[in-house]
Amino acid sequence: MCFSVRPYGRPDVTTVKAIISFYQSSIGKKWIVALTGLVLVGFVTGHMIGNLQIFLGQEPINKYATFLQGLGELLWVIRGVLFACLGLHIVTTVLLTIQNAAATPQKYAVTKSQAATIAAKTMAISGTIILAFLIFHLLHFTAQTIHPEWQGWHDAEGRHDVYSLVIVGFQNPLATGFYLLGVFLLCMHLSHGIQSFIQTLGLRSRKIADPLTTASPYLAGLLFLGYAAIPVASILGILKPLH
Amino acid sequence: MSDTLNLTLKVWRQKNAGTPGKFVEYPAKNIPTDCSFLEMLDIVNETLVQQNIEPIAFDHDCREGICGMCSLVINGVAHGPERATTTCQLHMRHFKDGDTIYVEPWRVGAFPLIKDLIVDRSSYDRIQQAGGFITARAGSAPDANSVPIPKQNADSAMDAAACIGCGACAAACPNSSAMLFVAAKVSHLALLPQGQPERTRRALKMVTTMDKEGFGNCTNYYECEAVCPAEIKSSFISMLNREYAFAAVRDGVSVI
Amino acid sequence: MATLDSKIPSGPLEKKWEKHKFDSKLVNPANRRKYTIIVVGSGLAGASAAASLGEMGYNVKCFCYQDSPRRAHSIAAQGGINAAKNYQNDGDSVQRLFYDTIKGGDFRAREANVYRLAEVSSSIIDQCTALGVPFAREYGGLLANRSFGGAQVSRTFYARGQTGQQLLIGAYSGLCAQIAAGTVTMFPRTEMLDLVVVDGHAKGIVVRDMVTGKIEAHAGDTVILATGGYGNVFYLSTNAKGCNVTATWRAHKKGAFFANPCYTQIHPTCIPVHGDFQSKLTLMSESLRNDGRVWVPKKKEDCGKPPGEIAEEDRDYYLERKYPSFGNLAPRDISSRAAKQVCDEGRGIGSTKLGVYLDFSAAIKRLGENVIRERYGNLFDMYHKITGEDAYKVPMRIFPAVHYTMGGLWVDYNLMSNLPGLHVLGEANFSDHGANRLGASALMQGLADGYFVLPYTISNYLVTQAGKKVGTDHPEFVKAIEEVKARTEKLLSIKGKRSVDSFHRELGLLLWDKCGMGRTEASLKDALAKIPKIREEFWTNVNVLGDGNDLNQSLEMAGRVADFLEFGELMCLDALERRESCGGHFREEFQFEDGEAKRDDEHFAHVAAWENVGEVAKSVRHIEPLNYENVHLAVRSYK
């Protein structure tokens, strides 16, 4: 492009004012949803890759878990950032949804969707169920309040035996069922979410739009396969607890 | 030469914004397949006048798909079932004998209903007035060829400028968002060198006005793109998202 | 007989405008906001005038009947806009654009006006580019041009097939900036129903709010009408459904002279009529004739056959045959008449036998389908949408249709009517196109008037009006409001048997038959006898349902049709009195042996400006002689 002059902002607007009005605007909120979503997708991806080490055996996964626990304050910083993102993501989407409902006071008698996917249309529902699932999941594996006895499981090296407790946890069909539903909805949420942040962060152009948009559900599908592999292997007895 | 159809219409009738509306059923008999949807309504209106029933009010003007005045939701789809087609260019050959057709107005909070199928789209004008222009007073322009514009940029600007301002994007959006319209307007001028001096202000003010008018937020359903008669691409919305964020940064942390 | 002072400046042609600008009076920038200017219409002429006057500091009120000024029918122009830029280095110049326009108008336009139009044409392109109009460009980034509508140079600028929309959005965006700045107040969905004249000066208008039905008046120091043409008098035309003659006709009845109403342009490339239900005709851009070849079968008996079964030697490429040097690109009036002739001979095609082929097969063979798709894809798509036919495979069917009206309110060099204070711009005036308009010249004229002519000339009138403000409480305003209310109530109270549309169709069909592409003394006299009868029935048997205090489309149309029913008579009267053929006015009695139009320069090299004295039939015909000092009146030949 041949622009010689870069345009600058309005003289009467301060930085604080600009930040506030950015968040107040519809596009600003979308950016917040997209950026926090991006962080959460990053976490979800990393978490999956970490978890898949379970297929390498007891040693690597327990070592990995001990490493994470050993991060100390840093772990809490990471958790803090993740929770902040989650909180912002939820609060902002709730605000957007309320505004959207108000923008259409009278509904059509007949509607015939031309483009929206099921994933796109169910973001609010899938998001709410994912939140419930997340709380359960944290209580189940992270805080282990459901099975306090897991706290005392250790491997030969004296490390917390995460390997066994995960497999034992997934041998409960109810827990596994809810887990599978949770990750399925999460991945459906992401199949819309991934292409959405490409769109919202302004990364889409006519050259890269279609491959990325098309790839979005496949990426989500891969995440689902990765997450589903562990409970399925556990319940089928492919993975066996050592405790 | 042409075949004819017999149809049942269920048309939204509403005297004015203050009176509740309802669907009223009208038969549409012997409709030639060669006529347009609006001509079909003309025929129905002619029979209504014969029965001393006030004709159905609907917006229309050029009837050649460019003025953006016509605005009907036909069986749940803004501008009806044909892609890239305004209501006035939708022809009855796309319907079958015996069909029941629901005809509704744009239902968008920021487009208040005036009568029957007519809504008030002046919110789009106000968005345009907020910044959808280049301030270039007559008499001050340099020679048109003094600033060459790469063909690709000019073509992209033209793709965005093709918007006819009909409002189908907001009408089709489950959130009643006007993003495709605003995206087309902002992108058109942001892609041209003449649009640079007001680029920041334009993006900020147009989006602020869009929000103030009560349009909803884009959640990337892409229903707008699917019904747009001018085939404006949703990638322009992505461009608007970028334009707006960069403008906000420039607005907040300007270095000069 | 009143003399019409055209106020054309003295001096050589190329210096007249320069001189006039210098001689014109000025209004001090600080005083401009004290003047209120009423602009009716928001098409290219109205929007550009309102925006420019707002920029200059005047207090502008702009009115349009559409829901937004962006929808005015200028938007539908497809082909392009002319300008004497000579960017293609093919020998174009102001002089050449001037000459082409005068000749194209069949030597029935004013030299000085046309020269000025050609002179300011370049600035229009500069202005529109500055406003962000995305004109077509070449790979080097410079503007592209094409040759268009009977020109032998490439001087037409275009934006895909929607030049009109892009130019209008440009003008509209400038208008938006002024609305935001507070210099222009916009009144959409507001229709002008009368002009208010106080002491012989146009001082305001009466309008109806089309949503609430409220009838009220607006006062100003001058009134500008930019309300387009009267093509819809024919019912079927390429105009938008809402286009009407009401604003100009009401002004005419208040004293403004109507000039050359018989000049109507029939555009050769429209999609043929295909049924009684049809509400409008769709134009296919004339640019199609750059690559399409027009033909009909040589033999009548072939007309029913599918075009593919008619052998090459049995086809009559009549434009190429009759006009070897211009061929398929012959000007609009000539191409239209040629199509009528072959159809009159019984060689028309399609179910109505009123159609000719526009065939792209040779161009597709030569250039490939992709090139044709790139050039005209949107037009082929539009054709497909309307007819359901694929023009890449079968030839298009086309037929002439009413498109543009060269006649309009009489104006002087300042664009002011004989009625002081009333300025008329764009298609609504008569000034620049003579008896026929060339392609891509309407957009040029609308924007020239609004951006570069009126802003200079309007002050000549305004300076005379300092301290002569009139309010809407003036008795003339009160009277005008009462008249409009009475007329509205009358229309609503008839409650007869027939719809407004049925009268409009009846009038349109009659005019198309009697005062369309070919006119004769007998046909015009017949029409003149019949129109008053239709009008009489209208005022006793029309059924306008609903009430006046609401949005009421039947009522809106009824008012317009009532005016068309009067105007149509004047059009026929003018056609009857102009005993020659010229441009869009073809009197069958006046033709050469080969069927070409035969002008009568000795008796008719003048503008006919009609004065209303009550009954239309008694209208008085005034004359403004046309003096040609710079061009030689010649038989217009495109052979």
Image: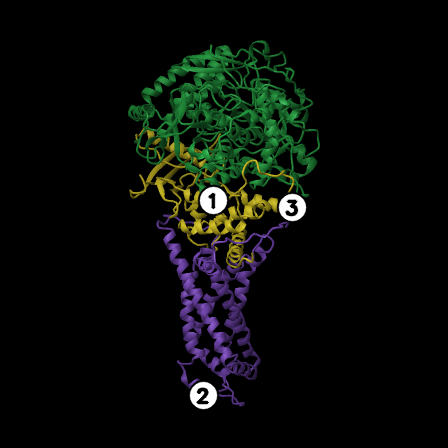
Q: Which mark is residue B150?
A: 3
Which three-letter amino acid code belongs to the residue tagged 3? Pro
Residue C611 versus residue C140 in the image, above or below: above
Residue A167 % position (x, y): 48, 80
Q: Nearer the viewer, mark 3 or mark 2?
A: 3
Provide the letter of the chain coloured yellow: B
Q: Nearer the viewer, mark 2 or mark 1?
A: 1
Q: Which residue is mark 2?
A: A152
Q: Colour of chain C?
A: green
Q: Which residue is mark 1?
A: B128
How far apart are the alpha carbons under marks 3 and 2? 70 Å
State which quadrant residue A211 falls in.
bottom right
Residue C52 % position (x, y): 50, 35
Q: Kindly indicate whether the residue at mark 1 contacts the one at mark 2 (C-beta within 8 angstroms).
A: no
**In the rendered structure, the residue with mark 3 lies on which chain?**
B
Which three-letter amino acid code belongs to the residue tagged 1? Gln
Provide the letter of the chain coloured purple: A
